[in-house]
């Protein structure tokens, strides 16, 4: 119903769901169930998930080699820890796979690429750019902290670096300040992206609305979401130990589990109308070539 204000300008009253999606209160047991469901998704489509995420172990190895070669070894840990900041955006295809399995549809590697055709992909890209900027800022901040502790003097190798960090006063200062600063960056990333990308994929929400919803989720479930952030950090750390190869399992698991966590914490919209799939395009026989290059030539008048 239109509401009249000064100047007789009609303004539509806001819809009932203007406050955003309804958020449930979850328990720690829900995190376990989300991880269990995520593992089931990973077992159902392991090859697809690994194909989507193989770039990350490779990237980790490349980063390690670059760090070793250019004597910037102190950045290896910040770079590895930074995966947690950009991970929600990297798992877009995994959310799509979990969504399809939830609807009992066939899931394949190409289906994961359908996320590129989502009406809200632009918003996803915008939020992903924000997370990337957060990642770059974190790496620059970590470098500044190291310089404040040890100056610009390089290290001669891994043993020299470990000795500096673990046996000197400056090293322990670096650990405390670096971990504290990293925690703040991780907290910021968690607050703005906890359920943002699944929400944009599922309801085609805008980036701002999705971030606001994630903040509301964290505010309403501080303990479970803090535990979820700790689980993500621990699993990513474990995934980097065997030459980053463990990320090929950890990232898909966390990506699938994030979708199920979203389903647990956000009440489903019963009136949601999903975007219809693109029309089926029948295969053209080779005998129709090159006529099938000009489909308008085959139209008949009504």
Image (tube, helix red, strand yellow):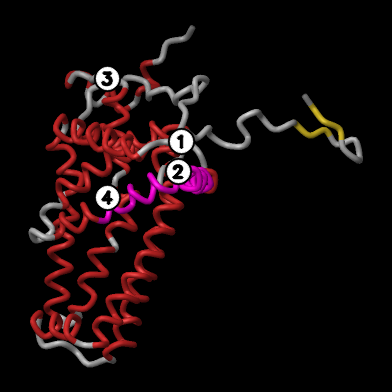
Tell me where residue 281 sits by quadrant. Answer: top left
Q: Distance between the residues labelled 3 and 1?
A: 27 Å
Residue contact between numbered discs 4 and 2, judged by CB atoms under 8 Å: no
Residue contact between numbered discs 3 and 2, judged by CB atoms under 8 Å: no
* SS type, badge 2: loop
Q: How far apart are marks 2 and 1 (CA)?
A: 6 Å
* SS type, badge 1: loop
Q: Which of 88 and 220 is in front in this view?
A: 220
Q: Earlier in the sequence, mark 4 or mark 1?
A: 1
Q: Which of marks 2 and 1 is nearer the N terminus?
A: 1
Dot in front, 3 or 1: 1
Q: How far apart are marks 4 and 1 (CA)?
A: 19 Å
Q: How far apart are marks 4 and 3 (CA)?
A: 28 Å
Q: In which quarter of the image is the N terminus?
A: top right
> Disc 3 designates what residue?
104
Residue contact between numbered discs 2 and 1, judged by CB atoms under 8 Å: yes
- Residue 145 to residue 229: above or below: below
Where is residue 225 shown, x and y percent of the image?
39, 47
> Disc 1 designates what residue?
25
* SS type, badge 4: helix
Few, some or many residues within 10 Å of mark 3 (<14, 14–19, 20+) = few
Q: Residue 221's mark?
A: 2
Q: What stretch is highlighted in magenta?
A: 210-233
- Residue 18 to residue 67: above or below: above
């Amino acid at each position: 119903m239109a509401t009249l204000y000064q100047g007789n300008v009609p303004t539509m009253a806001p819809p009932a769901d203007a406050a955003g999606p309804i958020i449930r209160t979850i328990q720690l047991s829900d995190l376990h169930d989300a991880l269990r469901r995520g593992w089931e998704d990973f077992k159902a489509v392991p090859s697809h998930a690994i194909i989507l995420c193989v770039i990350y172990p490779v990237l980790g190895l490349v980063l390690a080699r670059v760090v070793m070669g250019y004597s910037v070894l102190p950045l290896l840990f910040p770079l590895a820890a930074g995966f947690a900041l950009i991970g929600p955006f990297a798992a877009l295809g995994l959310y799509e796979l979990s969504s399809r399995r939830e609807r009992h549809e066939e899931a394949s590697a190409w289906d994961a690429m359908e996320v590129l055709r989502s009406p809200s992909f632009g918003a996803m890209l915008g939020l992903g750019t924000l997370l990337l900027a957060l990642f770059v800022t974190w790496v620059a901040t970590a470098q500044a902290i190291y310089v404040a502790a040890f100056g610009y003097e390089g290290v001669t190798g891994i043993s020299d670096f470990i000795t500096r960090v673990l046996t000197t006063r400056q090293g322990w200062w670096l650990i405390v300040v670096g971990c504290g600063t990293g925690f703040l960056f991780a907290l910021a990333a968690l607050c703005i992206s906890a359920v943002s990308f699944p929400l944009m994929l599922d309801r085609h929400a805008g980036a701002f609305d999705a971030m606001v919803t994630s903040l509301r989720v964290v505010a309403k479930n501080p303990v479970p979401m803090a535990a979820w952030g700790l689980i993500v950090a621990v699993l990513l750390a474990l995934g980097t130990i065997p030459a980053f190869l463990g990320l090929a399992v950890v990232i898909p698991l966390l990506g699938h589990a994030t979708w199920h966590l979203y389903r647990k914490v956000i009440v489903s919209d019963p009136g949601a109308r999903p975007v219809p799939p693109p029309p089926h395009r029948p295969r053209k026989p080779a005998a129709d070539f090159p006529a099938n290059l000009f489909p308008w030539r085959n139209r008949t008048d009504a």
